[in-house]
Image (spheres, grey):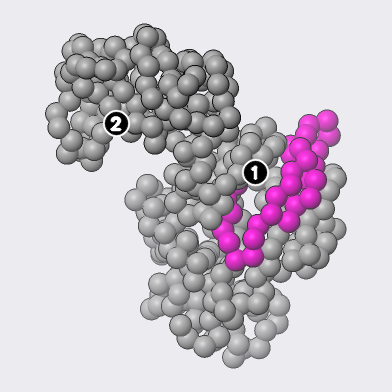
Amino acid sequence: MQPGVLSPQNNPAAVSVKLEGVVKKFGKVTAVERVDLELPAGKLVTLLGPSGCGKTTILRMVAGLERPTEGRILFGGEDVTRLPAYLRDITMMFQSYALFPHMNVYQNIAYGLQVTRRPKAEIKERVVQVVQQVGLSGLEDRPVAALSGGQQQRVALARSLVMQPRVLLFDEPLSNLDAKLRKRVREEIRDLQLELGITSLYVTHDQEEAMAISDLVVLMNKGIIEQQGDPRTLYTRPISRFAADFIGRANFFEGRYHGGYVEVAGYRQPYRQEGISGQVTVMVRPEALRIQPSGEGLEATVHQVSFLGSTTEFSLDTPVGRLEGVVAGDAPELPGRGERVKVQFAPQGMFLLPA
């Protein structure tokens, strides 16, 4: 890494961000209801949830574009609740990129430094460094209108990074890209965030995107935090049906748990989970369905099998409803439509919720 380029070691600007009892009301509508949240310094935290859940409102309050109705926001222990956006030392990547179409790549990236009256030599050095980091070398003189969508996204990212902010904010930055490009750019964003160690808050409604890039995922629902944790914990140990259903795909059905067994429609499967008993809602991920022609298992009839290349999806009609499953594309051929099978559930893809 070149001298002067930000890294976790030479980026003392990275700070923790804390929200304490934050409430935001718009008239009689409560958009955010008493949220307590901490973003560790240098980590990437994603706010995930459906439209209207409050995630963008939280982002705007951290940015200083909205003021909390109640509560405090702190950067590194400093109360910035009433500090205007331009004094918070943050930058934001918007969904629309917000590039200047009459400027070239270099001018777009340098604009913020010029507005803040940095010395010309410093501007040139910082722009050159960040252009190399985001893979835009050789395109400095190109009009942004002549760039591809992915290249424009990199310009927007470079313009944010060149300011060396304390906190970097992302407002659904990849929603305008196609699926393949979105995957590549999100990996680039994550690589740069890890390399630079900038505290980052990322907003998306795409659960795959959140799982792929985050140190911490915060799942929002109707203005409150439904659950927060690392991606693996949210996927394997959801605390509610909403969390289980929003993070990935899942089958739900009623059962009973007692003595180390889950009982479902006459089938008893060994399973252990602390802190729950009696009537339960069983959550089973599609990849946890195991089918066999005979033996132990829940009675089922194959409804449909769909080969999708890398995976094969199937559905089963059972006494507890239709279950959806998936196996790797190179797995052994599955039974055909209408065939009777037995289905079991891999314990690592199961979780029990209160009925």
Residue 250: in sight, yes or no?
no
Across and down, in percent, residue 253 comes to 45, 17
Label 1 CA crowd tier, 10 Å (few <14, some 14–19, many 20+)? many
Across and down, in percent, residue 244 comes to 51, 32
Given the image, on which type of amino acid does mark 1 rest?
Lys
Residue most toward the left? 333
The quarter of the rendered structure image containing the C terminus is top right
Above or below 107: residue 156: above
According to the picture, the residue beneath numbered tag 2 turns out to be: 326
* Quarter of the figure with residue 122: bottom right
Specify the segment rendered in magenta.
Answer: 18-47
Q: State the residue in front, 270 or 232.
A: 270
* Quarter of the figure with residue 99: bottom right
Question: Residue, x 75% and y 52% (percent of image)?
Answer: 19
Considering the numbered disc 2 on the image, is that residue within a helix, a strand or a loop?
A: strand
Given the image, on which type of amino acid does mark 2 rest?
Val
Across and down, in percent, residue 22 comes to 79, 46
From the image, give the main secondary structure of the stretch colored magenta.
strand
In the image, 119: left or right of 286? Answer: right
Considering the numbered disc 1 on the image, is that residue within a helix, a strand or a loop?
A: helix
According to the picture, the residue beneath numbered tag 1 turns out to be: 55
Above or below 1: residue 297: above
Foreground label between 2 and 1: 2
Above or below 49: residue 159: below
Q: State the residue in front, 52 or 154.
A: 52
Question: Residue, x 47% and y 38% (percent of image)?
Answer: 236
Question: Residue, x 67% and y 32% (percent of image)?
Answer: 222
Q: State the residue in front, 260 or 329.
A: 260
